[in-house]
């Protein structure tokens, strides 16, 4: 993993344009990969399924979905200040992560165009969807007199290099976790329309079907490469990525719990449900999944979150920088220790689960 320093220069931004949040371990990242290695992937082991999913992506079921209806034609000036603050933060993070998907898919489709036309086509449809998602969220931010300068973000954001296999594991998981995040929020607000303080949430049902299809594509891609699931190394990597995605999700949701409370969602319950559902879904693609029913599982995940909250509180204190850094070390070690203990919990064999279902 190659990560360079944060380089955004907010003073270069136009007035009215929001400066990106400071990059931390929990902010959505931007990725690049080994495009030659992706181009030379042999897809023949799962060709039929991949073609079927590309046909689904081509059908573009949501082409008329992302149109702002009359419910957006009003002023949001009277929205409670605290609610506004946490909501704009949610919009910004979501927009950044949708846009990060767009950039990666766009670049993959451009680089593979002449060398792997099936993958290039799939990535171009997925880039189309993510651009719509990011654009829709950016328009929502504009309702609060803010917007993200996506050009600025493209040029000034740090890019992280992931080899293709890591991209396949992490993007698969981020699409599927995205699906569960959106659909659970949608179902909750469908039952409690009085809590929908802004019309965006009503779009999440069809929206999350895009993420689901993207996830299905990565599922088929992963299964077309036996080395990504049919050996002991793949089993270890899968456990590692499931764990890091679930812990990162927990830290982010709990640290930003106020947003979830604002729409009547208990962030602890929501986080547990999102993790359990994503883990169950991953049994379709991965050789192993995590044992989220293990009595220690969520206790240890929450200990990571407690340490993260302590570090976040420290970051806001007035101590000198080096003192803060020094005081953060034991909490950081505590997170790593809990993650190691979580990693050592015996996983569930998804290949056996799959053959039982059959
Ligand atoms: Fe998306
Ligand atoms: Fe997506």
Image (cartoon, grey):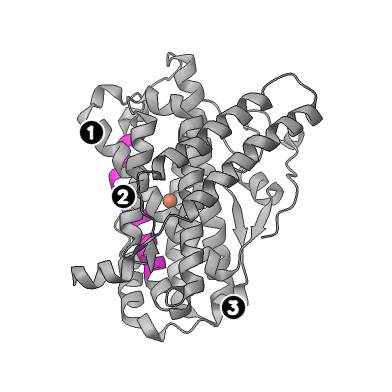
Considering only order in the chain, which callout, 1 or 3, is on the residue closer to the N terminus?
3
User: In which quadrant is the N terminus drawn?
Assistant: bottom right
Viewer-side residue, 85 vs 149: 85
Residue 329, horizontal then vertical, whole percent = 70, 37
**Range of magenta residues:** 200-219
Residue 23, horizontal then vertical, whole percent = 66, 40
Query: In this rendering, is residue 197 above or below 11?
Result: above
Q: Which residue is identified by label 1?
A: 190
Residue at screen point 46% across, 41% down:
301
Q: Which residue is identified by label 3?
A: 37
Residue at screen point 28% across, 70% down:
352
* Crowd tier of the residue under label 1, counting other residues whose Cα lies within 10 Å: few below 14, some 14–19, many 20 or above: some
Q: Is residue 203 magenta?
A: yes
Residue at screen point 43% across, 13% down:
78
Q: Which residue is identified by label 2?
A: 277
* Residue 272 visible in rendering: yes
Viewer-side residue, 285 vs 200: 285
Q: Quadrant of residue 287?
A: bottom left
Q: Secondary structure at mark 1?
A: helix
Q: Is residue 13 magenta?
A: no
């Amino acid at each position: 993993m190659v990560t360079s320093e944060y380089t955004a220069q907010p003073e270069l931004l136009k007035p009215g344009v929001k400066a990106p949040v400071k990059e931390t371990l929990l902010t959505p990242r931007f990725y690049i990969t080994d495009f030659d290695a992706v181009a030379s992937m042999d897809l023949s082991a799962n060709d039929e399924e991949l073609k079927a999913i590309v046909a689904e992506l081509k059908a573009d079921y949501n082409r008329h979905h992302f149109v702002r209806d009359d419910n957006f034609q009003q002023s949001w000036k009277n929205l409670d200040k605290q609610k506004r603050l946490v909501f704009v933060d949610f919009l910004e993070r979501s927009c950044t992560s949708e846009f990060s998907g767009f950039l990666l898919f766009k670049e993959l489709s451009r680089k593979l165009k002449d060398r792997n036309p099936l993958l290039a086509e799939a990535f171009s449809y997925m880039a189309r969807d993510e651009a719509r998602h990011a654009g829709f969220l950016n328009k929502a931010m504009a309702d609060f007199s803010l917007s993200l300068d996506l050009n600025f973000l493209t040029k000034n954001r740090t890019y992280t290099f992931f080899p293709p296999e890591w991209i396949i594991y992490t993007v698969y998981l981020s699409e599927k976790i995205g699906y569960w995040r959106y659909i659970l929020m949608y179902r909750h607000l469908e039952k409690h329309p009085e809590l929908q303080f802004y019309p965006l949430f009503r779009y999440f049902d069809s929206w999350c079907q895009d993420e689901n299809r993207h996830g299905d594509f990565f599922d088929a891609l992963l299964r077309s490469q036996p080395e990504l699931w049919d050996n002991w190394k793949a089993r270890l990597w899968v456990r590692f990525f499931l764990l890091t995605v679930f812990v990162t999700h927990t830290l982010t949701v709990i640290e930003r719990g106020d947003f979830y409370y604002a729409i009547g969602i208990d962030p602890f319950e929501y986080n547990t449900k999102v993790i359990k559902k994503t883990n169950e879904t991953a049994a379709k693609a991965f050789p192993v999944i995590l044992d989220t029913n293990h009595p220690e599982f969520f206790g240890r995940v929450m200990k990571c979150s407690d340490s993260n909250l302590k570090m976040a509180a420290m970051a806001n204190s007035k101590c000198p920088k080096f003192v803060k850094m020094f005081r953060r070390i034991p909490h950081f070690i505590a997170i790593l220790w809990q993650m190691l203990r979580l990693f050592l919990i015996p996983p569930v064999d998804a290949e056996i689960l799959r053959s039982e279902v059959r």
